[in-house]
Image: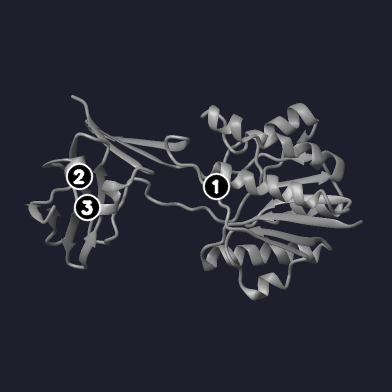
Amino acid sequence: MNKLALISTYCNDENKLNALRNTIQEYKNLGVYIFVYSPIKLPTDIEKECKFLFYTDENPVLEYPIRGQLYWWAKGNLKFTKKTSDYGWASNYQLKKLINIASTYDYDIYYLTIYDLDFDDNVRSLIKNNVVNVVSPSTRGWDYSLYFTPFDKQTMAKAEKFFDYSKYVSDSSICAEYTAKEWVEELGLTLQEKAINDTISETRDMFNLSFSDNYKLFIHNKSGEFKFIFGKPRGVIKVLVNDKLITTNIKHHFLHSTGFNVEEVSKFKIISEDGVHDYTHLVKQTSEIFKITTSY
């Protein structure tokens, strides 16, 4: 049987590139041809492994207020809120384009796949046994995932329409994986019991904006007074707003006021033992909103 892996990617570091290399090799070991979609130029060794390679500068990350991702965390009487760009549609857009392009070619089975798929015995068995039209839960606890979906050609062509931009931006309760749920409910795909995993988990401190190892930092850039808070400060730290020294008395988890409204801040720099770091862009940007509120 002729089989084609449709691999969505955004490999902007060596760790991700190595994950993509592994995914490609695993597929090729199982006799599957490779189609990679990428908004980033890939190394030559990866290009040579592909049957099809589609480059584009399109990467439709959605920005607030069209749609964003909201995170919050509370500590004592302080609540920290972070609204960031939404990457779900950019991922779904790649999958939609992969289906659209691949449907013009004649293969028996198509594997819609993320670049860092964990090839365990379950995944290999599904490929070896030519299983099609199944959706899997994720080991992260999600009931549905888009990590790995094997399709026959006819069903895949029908699946494309469920990547719906208008629906995605109009309903914030819809996540990227909602499409897989629709495939089960409306196209009759089977939801298998065994979960599938990805190999790269980007763990990061969502509420640390610092470039320094000498302190953690979070700010308030959502109108009103410009405020900031430090975590685990070490050594001498100086904070300057509009070139004015605000304080050198830095305390752990103490909310510092500046006397400036957010709109008045033209410069925001912090000096510590590892140098000067300029955070002005975090104050001025609108794609990410950081908010600190108090309750008593």
Q: Which residue lies at the image location 17% right of the left edge and 63% below the top edge?
A: 272
The amino acid pointed to by label 1 is: Pro
The residue to which callout 3 is attached is 232
Q: Residue at x 8, y 53 (%)?
A: 244
Q: Estimate the x, y position of residue 207 in percent, counting from the top left.
A: 33, 45
The answer to whether residue 119 is left or right of residue 201 is right
Q: Three-letter amino acid code at disc 2?
A: Phe
Secondary element at tag 2: strand
Q: CA distance from mark 3 to mark 1?
A: 36 Å
Q: In the picture, which quadrant includes the N terminus? A: bottom right
Mark 2, residue position: 228
Write down the residue under mark 1: 60
Q: What is the quadrant of the C terminus in the image?
A: top left
SS assignment at label 3: loop
Mark 3 or 2, closer to the camera? 2
Q: Are marks 2 and 1 in contact (CB under 8 Å)?
A: no
- In whole angstroms, how far apart are the C-alphas of marks 2 and 1? 31 Å
Q: How is the image coloured?
A: one colour
Residue 192 relative to residue 179: left or right? right
Q: Which one is earlier in the sequence, the residue at label 2 or at label 1?
A: 1
Question: Can you name the residue that lies furthest to the right here?
Answer: 1
Q: What label sits on residue 261 in the rendered view?
A: none
Which residue appears farthest toward the top when viewing the image? 296
Q: What percent of the width, then of the height, locates residue 256? A: 14, 43
Question: Badge 3: few (under 14), some or many (20 or more) residues near its Cα, within 10 Å?
Answer: few
